[in-house]
Amino acid sequence: MGYVAVKGGIQAIEESIKRLKYERLKKGTVLDSQQIEGGMRCLIDQVMSESSLYCETLTAMAIKQAEGSPEEAVFLLRAYRSTLPRKHYSRTVQSEEMLVERRISSSFKEIPGGQILGAAMDYTHRLIDFDLNKETDDEAIKWVCEYALESGVDNDQTNLSNLPKTLDYLREEGLISTCEINYDEPDDVTKESLHFPTSRSQRLQILTRGQTGAVTSLGYAALRSYGALHPTVGELRIGNLPIYVDSPFLEQNEDGDAYYIGEIKVTEVETLFPEEIQKGNGEKEIEFDIGYGICYGQNETKAIAMSILDRCLEAANPEYPIHNEEFVLLHIDSVESTGFISHLKLPHYVTFQSKLDSVRKTKK
Amino acid sequence: MRIEYNFAFFDEGSKREIRRATLKAVAIPGYQVPFASREMPIARGWGTGGLQLTLSLVGKEDILKVIDQGSDESVNAVNIKKLIIKTTGIKVTDETSEATIIQSRHRIPEIPLQAGQILVLQVPLPEPLRYYEPSELETKKLHAEQEYSGAWLMLFEQIMNYGTMSTGADHPAMVHDRYVMAPSPIPRFDNPKLNHSQALILLGAGREKKVYAVPPYTRVESLAFEDFSFEVESFQDKCCGLCGAKGVFLDEILDDLTGETFHQCNDTSYCLQRLNQKSAG
Ligand SMILES: [Zn+2]
């Protein structure tokens, strides 16, 4: 009798879920989520960033359950996130305090503190390494020990937990307009839904949890022809940031009263956009505007694209869709876009019947 | 790592926040109240708005009915029910009159709702003006100024082009002479049931993060013109092939074997109830 599910829906679902489990296990091996945590660092970083939930262990479990689908893994973590009471906000994190692992600037050859390449795929040839097929745990441990000895003899005295920002140099020269530090409490998009026009704190939150592909594509569209001049990466840095929470038992928290609750790895990007400034006397000057990107984990492309989109949304030139905050912010969330697209798989026979009635009436 | 979920999935703080938005929605019939929609274990667009309302309201004594496109057994209805049972352990039913909360996608049951019941409708697109105004900022202004000429114009153009209002499901309605509301994609057939409903009707859009309401005994009028009235879907003299019901919303079904079309109640529990009564009487 066709598509109409009169009875039997429950059983059909049970069978479908069984089939899904079979697909996950049919090759006779079980993926250990510790192995995912060990070997799938980039996927974990991407999923944590899109989920806006920082926990490598939970993320590895979600990736296992999702059979490696990032959209499913993000979905699982976001749903889990909904069950967690929000008890504290951390203290404001100063990114100058990052313990830097990698840091590059494409604006200056020499930057105070130096360029630090760290770990990156940028400098590898993308040739499949067939030797990885034969890699063993013993070899891996041996290599890691040797590497530790080798890098232990490094004599560099640079203090990696307090590197100056590249942009400070431009600020001192007056090439970037200085701005007051904004002490307003940021809006929390997970506590209150977006309203337009948005605040910058709302925009940055939506961008940082955006789907990696969507953020990258829109950033690329702006870069290619829909709205941004060619920016320069002032500084891209990756490293760990310490997180502190005020004591809930004290009325007034002094500097030393906060609790250290752990650290998070982030990618932070500041890009520079040359901008024409009108002077009072009719003359023009060029200064730099800044785009800002920050993501959980090592997510360099997304963070750079985020900084482009941040700048585009600040400029808000009505000529370009990428400058339109509703266009960008309402369409880059993984859970929202994949959910609504996939809902087309649900039966629509009542709505279709209703449309059919209208169509027939137009034919009369 | 093993974690137990809270009653009705959410933490209590989240439930309270959703209920606050709901109270505001009841206080301003037809007005779309923004709320911090949570991500759910079912996908956006699959009823997360309705689900959040249900979970925020449900108590241990409640009896729940979930239908999707008129059917208690369709995969999505089953799935939502499974999740609610798993996280609350409450009783579920197929019978409309027995339920205290009815969550539905795209239908209002055939059996009239009673005072004390709550109907939760799942909403994909809560903004009735979105069809001609893509910007949220602009539609918000239009509602504030009660500037609905675009909605009327849309219907007028349909009449001029096709000789009929070609809205299909989700035909816009005026709530209490103030807000134009998307009734969710219920067929036009169900629009009149919104008017002076004895039950509280709540509408939840999870992805679009809006809640709105039609409190009991609220005036809800489908948009139409004095000289061109609102029409529901017509099934002429057709009746249900199973129970013989007339004047209900019917599904059109193609018989695989004979290639003929026949009709059947869309509201499966209503149909079943009639069949049971017949065999008993
Ligand atoms: Zn019937």
Image: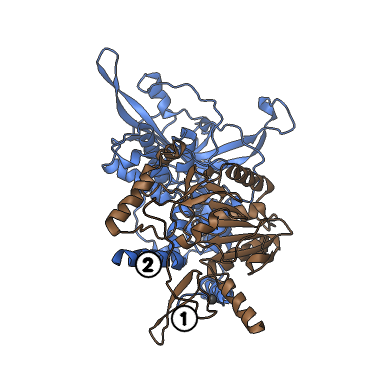
Chain colours: A blue, B brown
Beta carbon at label 2 within 8 Å of ligand 1: no
Residue topped by disc 2: A356
Q: Is residue A246 left or right of residue A34?
A: right
Residue at (45, 42) in percent of width and height: A207
State which quadrant residue A179 falls in. top left
- Does residue A360 sit above or below A263 in this rendering? below
SS state under label 1: loop
- Front position in the image: B159 or A56: B159
Look at label 2 and name its amino acid: Leu
Viewer-nearest residue: B178 or B209: B178
Q: Is residue B220 above or below residue B257?
A: above
Q: Nearer the viewer, mark 1 or mark 2?
A: 2
Which chain does the numbered disc 1 sit on? A
Residue under numbered circle 1: A1
* Viewer-side residue, A65 vs B53: B53
- Specify the quadrant of the image occupied by residue A175: top left
Res A140 label = none
In the rendered structure, the answer to whether residue B18 lies left or right of residue B237 reads right
